[in-house]
Amino acid sequence: MRERDLFTGLESPPTDEAARGTRRRGGDGGGGTAPPPTGAPLAERMRPRSLEEYVGQRHLVAPGHLVHAMIAGGKLHSLLLWGPPGTGKTTLSRLIAESLGLPFAQISAVLSGVKDLRAIVERAELELAASGRATVVFIDEIHRFNKAQQDALLPHVERGTIVLIGATTENPSFEVIAPLLSRSRVLTLEPLDEQAIGALIDRALADAERGLGRAGVTLAADARPVLIGHAQGDARIALGALEVAAELAARTTERRIDVEHLQEAVQRRTLRYDRQGEEHYNVISAFIKSMRGSDPDAALYWLVRMLEAGEDALFIARRMVIFAAEDVGNADPRALQVALAVKDAVHFVGLPEGRIPLAQGATYLATAPKSNASYAALGAVTAEVRGSGTLPVPIHLRNAPTELLRSLGYGRDYRYPHDAPGHHVAEEYLPDELRGRRWYEPADAGDERQIAERLGAWRAARAEAGTRRRR
């Protein structure tokens, strides 16, 4: 049997590995999962062996919900499992395949390439011909596959040779090609709640076969919430920290895991944050919305979240400059000056001291009066310009640097405002087709309250003068 190369379209002979049959690392053709080796990490040893052992994601696996319904109906669709690390994506995929008695193959988009994927498809073709069963192909971090690699999966999914289950920590709307997305159901997995993490900890402590039961260690009452909090909804983090802390506690007389053991085991919490991924945009969005909502405490919280996770301080400062103009605007014109000063200070002193001006700027912007009137006017005028095109400049506003242009009337009847009382003349400055149009409407907040009063008087005078001219 010959299979076309998924990426080049060229035919190539089956690999030796494909000829051996359907068994593969990470799957066994649907006949049950091989136990992990004794020396495997606790999180790997404690993987659930059945859906009954699976903890969390009740909105997917509980009776009446999608995964449960697919298994009960014996019909599996291609899936994209979207969620943060340690929420059970790999385990759920394996358990679904085993519950339906389907062959299972697993690869990582980071570690695998053309040869691995081609071999899986070849074995899936053989399996389908021999037994009529499609192979469940689990691709971890599928968002790491490029467009061509994702495109190459489509014909095999469409023919039913494979049932694709892709796992991703990134929003599949952005990272998975539209044809593949349309052929899959996106399931969102949530971080495990405290009850679920607690259940996993208790199971690991009690399990003598795969867990820590034979070690005879216990978990101190005050250490339990510390461990659960450290996990941040990630089962691997919880069990990894528990395993190291248990090794430390096993050397003591009490054999009890206390807070000190956990602190030594975890050293320092690593905040979940991907500077190129969705969480990056989620946190900066929360930061901006907290300042827009005039909550300096929340703004500081999200600021520190970004800094502790290693975000570029100048990226934060740039967003603050934009915010000052967009959301504070003329309600407090000093806000833009403050934001620019923060940017310069961060650039000048760097981190860690740059955190101080960032905090000052965030609290200033959060507590400043707000107006998006300039930003809203910009959008409205942009729409007008794109719609009405290049309307001619009124002749009295045109530049007249030469005698010829002056003879044509350029600049004629222009009145210089500084020669008038109050430095204002009731003049029209828009094209004739747009006379009287208004886009900038100052907010009734901060400095814009005074701007609104001045602008209202000027607009009224301009309207009156226009009425007189029309008479």
Image (spheres, rainbow, N blue to C red):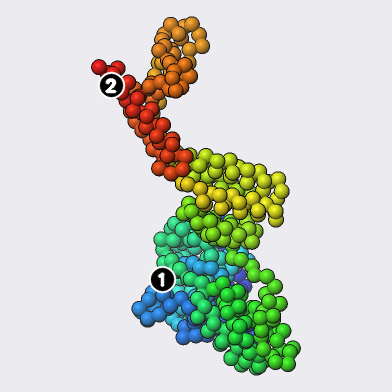
Side of 38 where 409 appears, left or right? left
What residue is shown at x 50% (from left), y 8% (from top)? 402
Figure quadrant of residue 268: bottom right
Check disc 2: other Cα within 10 Å, few if <14, some if 14-19, many if 20+: few
Which is nearer the N-term, disc 2 or disc 1? 1
The answer to whether residue 145 is above or below residue 269 is above
The answer to whether residue 113 is above or below residue 464 is below
Residue 306 visible in this rendered orientation of the protein: yes
Tell me the number on the disc at residue 360: none
**Observer-nearest residue: 317 or 120?**
317
The answer to whether residue 257 is above or below residue 231 is below
Give the percent coordinates (x, y) of residue 288. 51, 53
Q: What element does badge 1 sit on?
A: loop
Tell me the number on the disc at residue 77: 1
Figure quadrant of residue 466: top left
**Observer-nearest residue: 100 or 260?**
260
Q: Residue at the left extreme?
A: 471
The type of residue carrying mark 2 is: Thr
Give the percent coordinates (x, y) of residue 417. 45, 19
Give the percent coordinates (x, y) of residue 470. 27, 18
The type of residue carrying mark 1 is: His
Where does label 2 land, which residue? 467
Residue 122 visible in this rendered orientation of the protein: no
Q: What element does badge 2 sit on?
A: helix
**Observer-nearest residue: 152 or 76?**
76
